[in-house]
Image: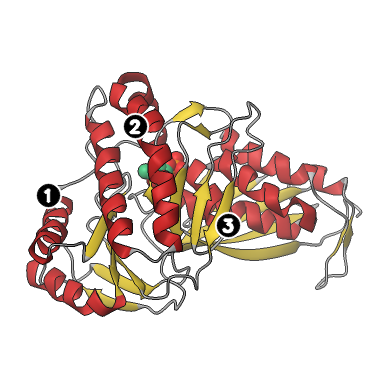
Amino acid sequence: MGSGEAWVVMRTGRAPSNIAVIKYWGKRDEKLILPVNSSISVTLNPDDLSATTTIAASPAFVADRLWLNGKEVSMESQRYKNCLREIRERANDVVDEQTGVHIKREDWLKLKLHIVSENNFPTAAGLASSAAGFACLVYTLAQLMGVNERYQGELSAIARLGSGSACRSLDGGFVKWDMGQKEDGADSIAVQIANETHWKDLVIFIAVVSSRQKEVSSTSGMQETVQTSPFLHFRAKDVVPKRIKEMEDAVARHDFSSFARITCADSNQFHATCLDTSPPIFYLNDTSKRLIGLVERWNTQEGSPQAAYTFDAGPNAVLFTTESNSSLLLQRLLFQFPPAPGVVLSSYVVGDLKTLELAGIK
Ligand code: PMV
């Protein structure tokens, strides 16, 4: 690599978002992003919810720069720096197929990058945009810099340094983020517990209730909850460990009743810890609460769970049901929320990646 030469090498990657059914909320180590409890998520269909990132490297670039959804953002945040540093340290010699340029392992430490990332869904509206974004950044960087296969298991821990939930977006299907015990976070990694074809008749609906940015970011919300909510500490110690086991079991057995019961209970408990924060944090709005009511009424009428809901740090709902019940759920949704222009409700079957889009929820 000669610094006077004008060349650019680039790579593009795509990573899906994920939605937790056992929530991560609260860090025990802010710098390393180590959680107070383990969590489990479902990886969403990248056609519906994903980030696409292109990274270019050139000796002509004078600084690392980043554009998110068309706007340049500062790379001063330690989160970006940490992810870049960790991947650069694992970089390899690369001969770029398109340009024939040979980049040596040590060159990656000096080469500056231009990074362009786009989400195909609302950013920071509680649909895990940072999860898809950081997973995509780490994955694409690793591809560009020829990171060795043997480091693949470490990519989730590196994505975690960007955004905790990002560590769960490097695999499809159902993923568990083990909180780990080590102080350096080496064992705080995500592992797939079932792949994307495991539960074929589980249907997921995303109800975009609002695409506005959330008022309290998950980072500051979590800090406040950890500092002020006694309930969070009870949850982390006495509730979540048992729920993680029950959820793993429900997924393994395709047991929709248990899956739905635990998913709703955990979403509600997470939002209860937000309410227990001082000052309280409210992520749900009236439409979210109507969606909860719709699912709860249906489940009570039938005497067993037909559907489940979960909400991250925002008002948008992720609803789960079985394929045989999906048209009934849709009917109920459309009855309560008649179609309105400009708002999207999408659904798909895990594994099948079938997508349908409807105008729908306000
Ligand atoms: O990774 P963060 O900082 O975006 O936090 C995510 C927190 C929740 O989405 C609310 C829960 C979760 O486990 O994804």
Q: Is residue 125 above or below residue 237?
A: below
Q: Pointer 3: what residue?
A: 170
Q: Is residue 215 above or below residue 114?
A: above
Indicate the amino acid at tag 2: Arg
Query: Foreground residue, 5 or 342?
Result: 342
Q: Which mark is in front, 1 or 3?
A: 3
Residue 11 visible, this angle: yes
Q: Which element carries disc 2, helix, strand or loop?
A: helix
C-alpha distance separating marks 1 and 3 = 33 Å
Q: Determine whether, in the image, residue 292 is placed left or right of residue 9.
A: left
Indicate the amino acid at tag 3: Leu
Place of residue 329 in the rendered image (x, y in percent of width and height, measured from the top left): 19, 72
Q: Which element carries disc 1, helix, strand or loop?
A: helix
C-alpha distance separating marks 3 and 2 = 27 Å
Q: Which element carries disc 3, helix, strand or loop?
A: loop
Q: Is residue 77 above or below residue 264?
A: above
Marked residue nearer the N-terminal end (1 or 2) = 2
Q: Pointer 1: what residue?
A: 286
Label 2 environment density (alpha carbons within 10 Å; few <14, some 14–19, many ≥20): some
